[in-house]
Amino acid sequence: MRLVLQLVARLLLIVALCLGAATVWATFDAYRSVDRATAASAQRVAHALQALYWQELLLRSSRAREHLLPVPDWRTLDMMKLISPGVCVEFQPAAAFEKPLCGQSQGIGKTPPRWFASIVPTFLGSHAEVVRPVSPRAAAAGAVVATPDAAAAISLAWEYILNVIDVALLMAVAIALLASIAIAHALAPARTIVTALQRMARGHYRTKLPRFRSMELAMIGGAVSQLGGRLEEATEQRAALTRRLIEIRDDERRALARELHDEFGQNLSAILAFADTIETASAKEGKDIGIAQDARMISQATHHLMASLRDALKRLRNPLPEELGLEASLVNLVDSWRSQSTARPTIQLDLRGDLTDISDAAATTAYRIAQECLTNALRHSSAREISLCVERRVGEDDALLIRVEDDGGGDATRVARSAGFGLTGIRERVAAAGGSLSILPARGGLSVAATIPLAA
């Protein structure tokens, strides 16, 4: 999952939690606001009745204090204005058949659903009545008792919640949208960094990154640039060491070829001469025929060893590209494999592009890779047809492509993981030249392709 989507999802979760908390708080505050309205109504009515009480006490001094209130004119429209909607007020002690004076409760709030009307009182409790004395200095003046309407309280709470949720939802959507845009803008440089890392994975280590405004991203970009520089230096050092190793190995091969030619080859020639002499002398003198046959068998074995020695010397001596050029050496390589046996698979050679101006090092590398790939295809598969294609690709990426395909089956994944000497040598030469190697399935067999960059 993309990082932007993860951050947006977490932001939406936080907004949802905040919205839920705001809803719970709004429910509690709206429900308890009725208690505050009830207390305020009781206080206002008690204050108004206190003024009326002292007025009656001054004007009607002949009456007993306990009979001053309530007077008939206290239930007026002005007194009802002092009572909050959904609250009823009565005077204590109440007169016979006297009804509470209630504020407007019709049309207050919105009709809540049944689940809300049943849940809210369960968790928040019921409303208590509020008692206020008419006059703290005259206890006989009576008291005011205010009682809230539970249904009106729940309706008011539901309407308040709906209003809060509407505003909160709009704010949540706006916050989520703006925050998503801000997060996407802040993380936009991450795509550039990922692209640079992908280029580095493909071997382009010198990837220049722009300067980022964010300090953290700037530090990451600097670290990526430093890593690319170090990887390029390490790759160059490894390529130089590999080239040196190949040079040393080629020198050893040439030295070994000289030793084999000078020592082993001369000894085989001497053995062959001795065997021919013994066979000829035995035939002239008419001695034991078995001696002549043994000498003939020694000659045949010596010829076989000399043929094997010549093949070994061909592989060990200086590569043909240094003498004949890449194109002629590849033709000679394919012809030599074709001439060894008619039972061998068919080898097709496809040369594309101008191969005449390729340097000795690149030509030697290409020749050795083609030679080793053909050897592997002939020895380790039951191929009936092998194709060798060498292509010169010109343009910005001047490179040499060597591809060997066969139809002899084989598991490309297993071969790619192989640590045999042949593939190891190919990998070393490709790495030394700064190229790339791929082993893929193709036409019922395997396709080994190497790309060798050419110097400008």
Image (cartoon, rainbow, N blue to C red):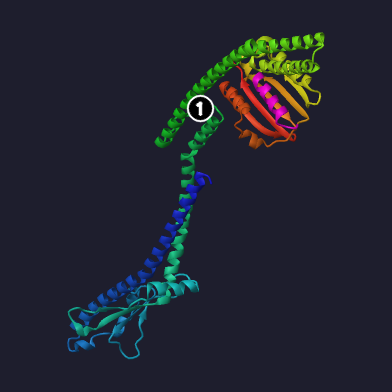
In magenta stretch: residue 377: yes
Q: Quadrant of residue 453?
A: top right
301 left or right of 2 in image: right
SS label for mark 1: loop
- Quick check: 275 left or right of 425? right
* Residue linked to disc 1: 207
Residue in the image at 32% along x and 91% along y: 96
Q: Is residue 103 above or below residue 69?
A: above
Measuring from the top left, give residue 331's x and y in whole percent. 74, 16
Please say if 120 is above or below 270. Answer: below
| Magenta residues, start to end | 367-382
Query: In what quadrant of the picture does the C terminus appear?
Result: top right
Name the chief secondary structure element in magenta. Answer: helix
Residue at screen point 41% across, 36% down: 214
Q: Residue at x 47, y 40 (%)?
A: 187
The one of 291 and 87 positioned closer to us in this rendering: 291
Percent x, y of residue 32: 36, 70
Q: Nearer the viewer, residue 26 or 324?
A: 324
Number of numbered discs on residues? 1
Q: Amino acid at mark 1?
A: Thr
Image coordinates for residue 100, horizontal then vertical, percent: 35, 83
State the image quarter where residue 69 is shown: bottom left
